[in-house]
Image (spheres, rainbow, N blue to C red):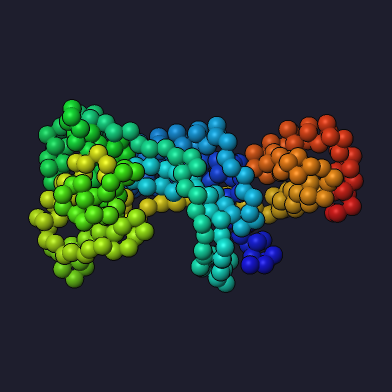
Amino acid sequence: MNKEDLLMFNQKALRSKAEIVRAINTYLEEATKANASSEGDQVPENYELMEAFEKKIERALIPFLEHPFSAYEINITDIAISLDMAEYSKIIFDQEGEIDEATASITPDIVSVRAPYITVDEFAKRRNVKSNTVLKWLREGKLRNAEKRENGWHIAATQGKPAREFDSGCYIFESEEGDLSCLGLFPIGAIFLEVDQDIACPSRYTIRLNDEYHRVLRQDVVDKDELLELEKTLIASPNVIFQSTFTDAISEKVGLGTGESEDARRIHEEIGNFIESAALPLETRRLLKVMLFHECDEELFLSTIQKLGLDDTLQRYLRENK
């Protein structure tokens, strides 16, 4: 990967807390508009969870990105939102400047939020249906992110009404100890159970049981009744969640324009070069970069530069490198 690759990467990658927050706000605005103009598949709790995630991001101390080809990425699943950190070792761009192929190591769940589980009566109230209707959905395996506790069924607050069409996805065993074999139906070592509908024969379903490394342990073909019994067992378990095949993600910055914003990026790059060349301890240089690029706290950065007696030197450097 070369300097041109790095330039294209930095044009879109989320590299600071401020960029993360702007991207979240834009996502919320666009999702709200899309849902208002059509039936949509979002429920109010999806937005509430994203808002809670944004507040947690703003309060969090997020690890600084040391590697140039690294970025923050937000993953949105059925019941959770997480901020991950990706460090790329290989990126291939297409002619439009989009990432066509990439290899990266992921540090997951730097910051995360999860939907609360609510009672049947509360879920019924929020979805404007009767409690008996919700219980019927549970018996039919139509509410996949739920669990049966000692005091009755509880359902993820972000769970919507059952979809009309079959939704493929994956059941995941979450406990740090054990695996799906504890349910008495699956092989030892099974952590993931993927389920897909046969396009050629919609009454048949393929299930694949994978270990923690996603190696296939067993693959079966079942009919609708057999699948229902399997899913009811999985749904009732407190250690199992469901994740739809089509999850969402936020991985690109927003609000990029031309003119002033381009100048601002150029000046930030020059300030970064100045920090690197300054005769300062390594840790001081690192903290200055965190203030400017990561926390985007320019006031604190300039105040620190003044205390270090470098304000005149910085201004002269910027004039000479216009």
Q: Whole-percent x and y of residue 255?
A: 60, 48
Residue plotted at (11% across, 56% down):
226
Q: Quadrant of residue 296?
A: top right
Q: Nearer the viewer, residue 278 or 53?
A: 278
| Extreme residue in the left direction | 225
Q: Is residue 158 above or below residue 256?
A: above
Q: Quadrant of residue 161?
A: top left
| Any part of residue 241 in sight | no
Residue plotted at (83% across, 46% down):
278
Q: Whole-percent x and y of residue 286?
A: 71, 43
Q: Nearer the viewer, residue 239 or 253?
A: 239
Q: Is residue 303 above or below residue 83?
A: above
Q: Whole-percent x and y of residue 315?
A: 87, 43
Q: Whole-percent x and y of residue 168?
A: 26, 57
Assign the N terminus to one quadrant of the image: bottom right
| In the displayed structure image, the side of residue 107 where residue 122 appears, left or right | left
Q: Is residue 286 above or below residue 217?
A: above
Count of labels in the image? 0
Residue plotted at (73% across, 41% down):
283
